[in-house]
Amino acid sequence: MPFCYIEEIGKYVSQKVTIKGWLYNKRSSGKIHFLLIRDGTGMIQSVMSKGEVPDAVFETYDKLTQESSLEVDGVVREDKRAPRGYELTLTDIRIIQIAQDYPITPKEHGTDFLMDNRHLWLRSSRQQAIMRVRNEIIYAMRTFFYEKRFILIDTPILTGSIGETATTLFETQYFDLGKAYLAQTGQLYNEAAAMAFGRMYCFGPTFRAEKSKTRRHLTEFWMVEAEMAFYDNEDNMKLQEEFIEYVVQRVLDKSKKELVSLERDLSKLEKIRRPFERMSYDEAINHLKKNGSKIEWGSDLGGEDETILANLYEKPLFVYNYPRQCKAFYMKPNPQRADVVLCSDLLAPEGYGEIVGGSQRDDDYDSLVQRIKEEKLPLDAYKWYLDLRKYGTVIHSGFGLGVERTVAWICGLPHIRETIPFPRMIYRLYP
RNA sequence: UCCUCGGUAACUCAAUGGUAGAGUGAGCGGCUGUUAACCGCUAAGUUGCAGGUUCGAGCCCUGCCCGAGGAGCCA
């Protein structure tokens, strides 16, 4: 008898198959039992009627509890009455283990309880859909870069030198060499790699010890960061548009079923096509002031400011040329205007906020040394980084995209915590 | 770190300062097409912790602990 995964059950219509999985839910009318079985690839309703199977098999229904593990044999049928189109007429059930008091019931639960049971919550159909979309998003990102001949270069997670200023870093003792920090970005290493390979990207976890407590923050999150030699910031923004469009449209194609089950409005995603909207930082400030914001030129945009701007359009919005003072030291000053840098943030629509930050990097040795001194950063730690401006410096640019914020946006989720299997947040390290 | 809200049965929530209750889940029984099935019965509580006010506190006051939403900061 063939073993089969539920996602390919359609290939086995009128055949007898074996399914291995877990009991999601059960219902009965007394002489007819319904078992909803999941196997990680999907869900199928299985049916048995009294008299049509041996009594011993029929009575195993009474013993089965939610999330008990089991193997079943049955004949595959197409049936409109089944929740997923196909149904299994059972011939045998073999119990592997009876689950005792599975805590997550089919009814409502609160956030705290679900987060404490995250290891089990992942079994529910909504979480399954989100993780499948996340999987497609990541695959689309990697495919995009692979097809463009970008090289994947893995950057270190334990670092000595710090990437940027402001944010707080997780630190740990590193043998006799002093403090090591968990990487908040791979960018500086990316620049070294771009000078070696031309166009590259890294994909990995990053860490911020910020005491942020919002629906858009994690202390551990995944970032995809690209770096390109001979790209100015205009080339950089064009690449970002192409990248986002590719990822959204591909996921829309590959994960339609999951997005529909998450009740995502697909028409909103269908509109994510190049070119995206653009607005300079100066224009953004003017618009915000006209609409009652207290923001002053020179400070970074707040969450509410971003939402006001992003809601003007149905497509993502680039805000470019930020003041030098609110951006990282490595960004290249605008040659026409020394008070702003050649950079852009990409704001996702529907209030999802910043998902990409990018810039042209300062390629001049003296100017970079000056900026490092201004920021009071340890010059020694950046010696290798400065070498990149000594040995064949070229114009180069790059960007970083937050994977979880992108997943939240594409799935239409209210909170980032459901976009990663085991979220790390300021007040949560378990499970 | 700051502001706001919350903590009552395993879960989700009720309960004018006056006998702590319902639904879900669990257990038992019924039902031959159920769709978070339905119907009946049963068990289930140190009301987050420590004090205080009061004849009497789940409810009012103080402190602490835990969580959520937001701010700042960021992807």
Image: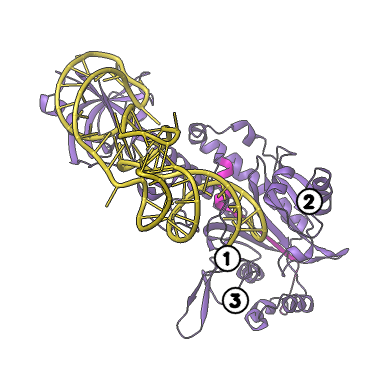
Tag 3 subunit: A
Q: Position of residue A403 (x, y in %)?
A: 56, 52
Q: Is residue A358 left or right of residue B26?
A: right
Q: Position of residue A117 (x, y in %)?
A: 37, 48
Q: Are marks 2 and 3 on the same chain?
A: yes
State the image quarter where residue A20 is shown. top left
| Amino acid carrying mark 1 in the image | Gln
Q: What is the spatial separation of the Cα atoms under label 2 and label 1, in whole angstroms?
A: 30 Å
Q: What is the spatial separation of the Cα atoms under label 1 and label 3, in whole angstroms?
A: 11 Å
User: Is label 2 in contact with label 1 (beta carbons under 8 Å)?
Assistant: no
Describe the element under mark 2 as helix, strand or loop.
loop
| Amino acid carrying mark 3 in the image | Ser
| Amino acid carrying mark 2 in the image | Lys
Of the two numbered discs 2 and 3 in the rendering, the one whose residue sits closer to the viewer: 2
Q: Position of residue A414 (x, y in %)?
A: 55, 41
Q: Are marks 1 and 3 on the same chain?
A: yes
Quickly name the residue at label 2: A294
> Which mark is drawn over residue A161?
3
Residue at 53 percent of width and 73 percent of height? A181
State the image quarter where residue B37 is shown. top left
Where are the magenta residues, as a range? A390-410
Q: Farthest residue toward the bottom? A: A176
Q: Are marks 2 and 1 on the same chain?
A: yes
Which chain wears purple? A
Would residue A49 be seen by someone viewing this image from the given angle? yes
Quickly name the residue at label 1: A184
Q: What is the spatial separation of the Cα atoms under label 2 and label 3, in whole angstroms?
A: 36 Å
